[in-house]
Amino acid sequence: MSRQFSDWIQAYVKYASVTEAPKRMHFWAGVGAIAGCLRRQVWIDMKRFQWTPSFYIIFVGPPGIIAKSTTIDIAADLLREVPGVKFGPNSITWQALVTAFANASESFEYNGEWHPMSPLTLVASELGSLLNLQDKDMVNLLIEMWDGKRKYEKITKMSGNDTIEAPWINIQAATTPHWIADNMPQAMIGGGLSSRCIFIYGDTKDRYVAFVDEHIAHGDAATREKLIHDLEEISLLKGPFTISEPARAWERERYEKYWKDAILRMDDQMLEGYAARKQTHLFKLAMVLCASRGDDLSIGVDDLRLANQMLQDIEGDMHRVFSRIGRSEDSMQAERFIEFIRRKGSVPYAEAYRMIHSYFPDFRDFEGVLQGALNSGQVLLSATASGMYIQAAGHPLETPAASKIVTPDTPIS
C-alpha cells in the first residue's frame, strides 16, 4: 500500500500542534514515533559498528508550561496502534527489563537470513519514575544499547546469567531542570548517558490555548487514521540504509569544520561528550527523516542538512537544561531575577524588589544581586521623572524620558 503523506513528520507536526507546546517538541515526538516503528530492522553499516535509529529524547521545561506530557502522549497514542511495536515498563529495573526483553524478542527476515532483535519503546511523563540515575548498572546498560551492542549479558548471584539478544531501546520522557539538578551529578554532564540523550528545552508557550478542542481541524479522526497507516508502512521497512556520495561529501566537510570549531570550545564541559556523539545523532536522525518521506533507504544531502539544522536548534539551549547543576540556591534566584527583568523589559525598582523579596528579605542581599547584574552588564538602572527603573540591557525604557542612566559604579541606594 502507498503512503498517505509525502512527509510523515511534517503531517504529524501539523496534526499535533493544537497544544501550547513549541513545534520543535512535536517534531522530536514525531521522530521518536518513527524510531519506535523502525526498531532494529534498519541500520547504517559502518563495517566496524552499526548505527540504529534509537533515541533517548528528553523533554525539559518548568512544570505546567509547555505540555511536555501531552506532547509525548500524542505521539505514543499513534505508535501504540502499530502492530509489532512493543512498549517497555514504566519503571526500569534490571529484572523488569529482562522480562520485557523476553516478551519483545523476535526475528525478522532480510535477504533470506533471520535477524534476532529485542526492541522496546519506553514512554514516561516523568523521567524520575522511569530511570534511577544512581543505578550504575542500568545507566551502563542504556549506554551500551544506544551504542548498538548486539548482545548484553549480566551475571547475578540470584538468577545466574541473563542474556539479551540484539537489545534495542527507544525512550521518550519528560522532566524539569530542577529534577536534573537534583539527580544528575555534575560529573555525568557532557559524557556517558547525557551525551547520548537528545534534550529538548522549552520554557515558553508557543501560543495560548484555553480549549484544545476549539483548535481541532475538521477531519481530525481521518488524519489520525492516515498517520497510523503510514506508521504501519514505515514499520515494514527492513535492511541497511545507504549514504549517497553527495551526502558523504557534505558530511566530510561538515565533520571537519565542526571538530575544528569544537576544539576551540573544549573548555565547555557540556560540549565534550556531545561533540563525540554529534555524528551518530546526525545519522540516527537522518535515517528517521529519510523513512518519513518514503521507502527508499538512501540518505541524501537534504536528510543530513535538515538533521543538522534540527540538532543545531536544540544545541543552543543545551546549557539551560543543565543550568541548575552545581549552583547555589542564591545564584539560581539571582538568575530568576534577571530573567524576570528581561521578560518585562523594564521594571520599576519597587516592583523588582517585591518580586524577589520573599527570597532576599534583607535589602542588602537584594542590593548585592542587583549590583552583580549591573556589573555584568545584564541590566541597567535608570532614574526617571517617575522614579527608578531597572531595565534589561539593550531594551528601550518604556517610561517617561530618563534623566540619567546609572552606571555600575553609581551607588544603588
Image (cartoon, rainbow, N blue to C red):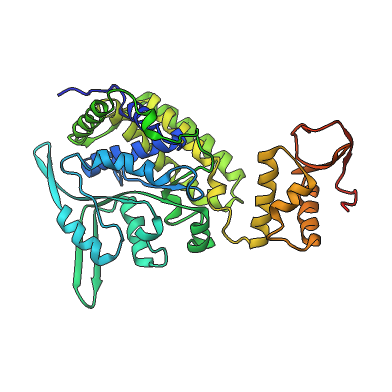
Residue 274 in the image: state x and y as whole percent.
48, 48
Towards the viewer: 143 or 208: 208
Left or right of 121 in this view: 328: right
Q: Indicate whether 288 appears above or below 268.
A: above
Q: Indicate whether 369 appears above or below 304.
A: below
Q: Quadrant of residue 242?
A: top left
Q: Residue at x 40, y 42 (%)?
A: 281
Q: Residue at x 49, y 34 (%)?
A: 208
Q: Residue at x 33, y 26 (%)?
A: 11
Can the viewer see residue 313? yes
Q: Indicate whether 90 appears above or below 6.
A: below
Q: Residue at x 49, y 32 (%)?
A: 254
Residue 192 in the image: state x and y as whole percent.
44, 57
Left or right of 146 in this view: 166: left
Towards the viewer: 175 or 195: 175
Left or right of 27 in this view: 292: left
Q: Residue furthest bottom?
A: 157
Can the viewer see residue 27? no
Q: How many marks?
A: 0
Q: Quadrant of the N terminus?
A: top left
Q: Quadrant of residue 404?
A: top right
Residue 59 in the image: state x and y as whole percent.
43, 46
Towards the viewer: 128 or 290: 128
Residue 221 in the image: state x and y as whole percent.
25, 29
Towards the viewer: 94 or 153: 94
Q: Residue furthest left?
A: 112
